[in-house]
């Protein structure tokens, strides 16, 4: 179910069966205001209200690299917010673009201090499979 979007840049969806928010990135050429509204205000609040356990970032088709101010915002505020609302897993569907992949690696390196487990997968289906397996293990 779609929660919000930034046209031609980002689609934010709720995946009830795995209790996860999924960001489908089309372009990393996004303003801090657009990013903050979609992720921090709308996405995080939705995740909190629905007791999300994971955040899936599907960057497989993304173009470009986040501006430095967004990378800083992610490492300083977004991951802290994820921890505060109970996100256990940040699942990254890796970009196909080598340039985009380097940008993603830069901000992913900030996850550890926040106690969030980074899981890298090749596809959204892989993310769903990982989360379903975690439910079996915990069950």
Image (cartoon, rainbow, N blue to C red):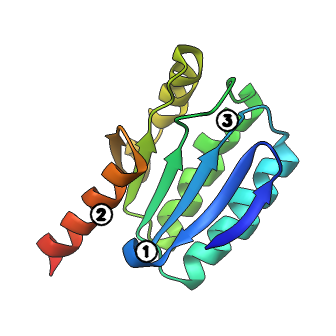
Question: Which class describes the residues within 10 Å of circle 2: few (<14), some (14-19), or many (20+)?
Answer: many
The answer to whether residue 10 is left or right of residue 132 is: right
Q: CA distance from mark 2 to mark 3?
A: 28 Å
**Residue 15 position in % (x across, y down):** 49, 71
Q: Which mark is residue 19?
A: 1
The answer to whether residue 115 shows anywhere in this view is: no
Residue 34 sits above or below residue 103 on the image: below
Point out the frontmost of discs 3 and 1: 1
Label located before the other in sequence (2 or 1): 1
Identified at 52% across, 35% down, the residue is 60
Identified at 80% across, 43% down, the residue is 8
Q: CA distance from mark 2 to mark 1?
A: 9 Å
**Residue 93 position in % (x across, y down):** 44, 41
**Residue 34 position in % (x across, y down):** 84, 50
Q: Which mark is residue 72?
A: 3
Question: According to the image, label 2 marks what residue?
Answer: 131
Is disc 1 placed on a helix, strand or loop? Answer: loop
């Amino acid at each position: 179910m779609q929660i919000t979007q930034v046209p031609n840049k980002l689609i934010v969806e709720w995946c009830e069966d795995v209790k996860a928010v999924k960001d489908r990135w089309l372009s990393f050429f996004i303003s801090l205001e657009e990013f903050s509204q979609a992720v921090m205000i709308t996405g995080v609040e939705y995740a909190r209200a629905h007791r999300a356990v994971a955040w899936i970032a599907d960057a497989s088709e993304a173009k470009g690299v986040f501006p430095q101010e967004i990378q800083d915002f992610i490492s300083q505020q977004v991951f802290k917010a994820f921890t505060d609302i109970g996100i256990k897993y940040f699942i990254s569907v890796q970009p196909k673009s080598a340039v985009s992949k380097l940008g993603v690696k830069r901000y992913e390196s900030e996850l550890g201090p926040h106690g969030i487990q980074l899981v890298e997968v090749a596809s959204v289906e892989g993310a769903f499979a990982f989360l379903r397996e975690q439910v079996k293990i915990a069950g």
